[in-house]
Image (cartoon, rainbow, N blue to C red):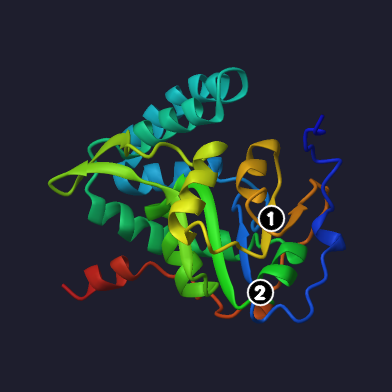
Amino acid sequence: MAVPRTANTIPTIYECDSKDRENQTVVADLDGTLLIGRSSFLISLIAFDVGGILRFLFLLLAAPLAGLLYHFVSESAGIRVLIFATFAGVKVADIKSAASAVLLKHYSEDVHPETWRVFSSCGRKCVLTANPRIMVEPYLKNYLGVDVVLGTEISSYKGIATGFVASNGVFVGENKAIALRRNFGADSVPDIGIGDRNTDFPFMELCKERYIVPSRPGVRPVSQDALPKPVIFHDGRLAQNRLH
């Protein structure tokens, strides 16, 4: 009988050799893996930016329900509530603008040093995340050099986000594995899979090597000068408004 994989049966990222990886492909989760923390705080920043105090308060009211669903029903259910509360009725263009202007500094100050050591050593980089792709892609592609971002897709109608998740669902558990197979194909196996929780195991199983990122208090993020492109924080939209 096969022994179920747990965090205790998979080597940690600290055991991964990052030498001679230039021709290899790495796939990593985002929250708790490539980033030290989680994005629950950051989604509140997006909510405030795209909808002001009323949207922020609506998200705060929805947060307890999301937390209960996340911990006692499923990750997917909790994330769906947060996405709806944050994005329903918001212009897609405004979401993209907020993601580019608000989140860059926070992401750049939270990159996990050990994951980055391995991730940056590989020639092709993919991030697979439950976060809405529209929210995380600007930073990952433009500042970390990620080639492929696979994230939860938000449905929209005539340029307005409905707040509902697209038909392929929230990217947790088996949905991550499905997305990875769909993108890479049956004959292309990623070399390294990196995650931080049990629900990452389905996509990690599709990779040749698998590593877990353990939660360790006091981990210091990668310094700005060690990243490919430093973030100079300013809101370009404010600068543009001053010109008019």
Reading the image, the residue beneath label 1 is 194
Instruction: Using residue 87 as the reference point, say whether residue 132 is left or right of it.
Output: right
Q: Is residue 67 above or below residue 178?
A: above
Local SS, label 2:
loop
- On the image, the x and y values in percent for residue 9 come to 85, 42
Asked if residue 135 can be seen in this view, the reply is: yes
What residue is rendered at 37% in x and 28% in y? 58
The reply to whether dot 2 and dot 1 touch (C-beta < 8 Å) is no
| Of pointers 2 and 1, the one earlier in the residue sequence | 2
What residue is rendered at 42% in x and 65% in y? 138
The three-letter amino acid code for the residue at tag 2 is Ser
The three-letter amino acid code for the residue at tag 1 is Ile
Question: Which numbered disc, 2 or 1, marks the residue closer to the eye?
Answer: 1
The one of 112 and 200 positioned closer to us in this rendering = 200
What residue is rendered at 32% in x and 33% in y? 54
What residue is rendered at 38% in x and 67% in y? 235
Residue lying at the far left in this picture: please name it.
Answer: 158
Q: Give the quadrant of the C terminus.
A: bottom left
Splitting the image into 4 quarters, where does residue 73 fall? top right
Q: Is residue 190 above or below residue 4?
A: below
Instruction: Using residue 87 as the reference point, say whether residue 122 is left or right of it.
Output: right
Splitting the image into 4 quarters, where does residue 197 fall? top right
Q: Give the quadrant of the N terminus.
A: top right
Reading the image, the residue beneath label 2 is 120
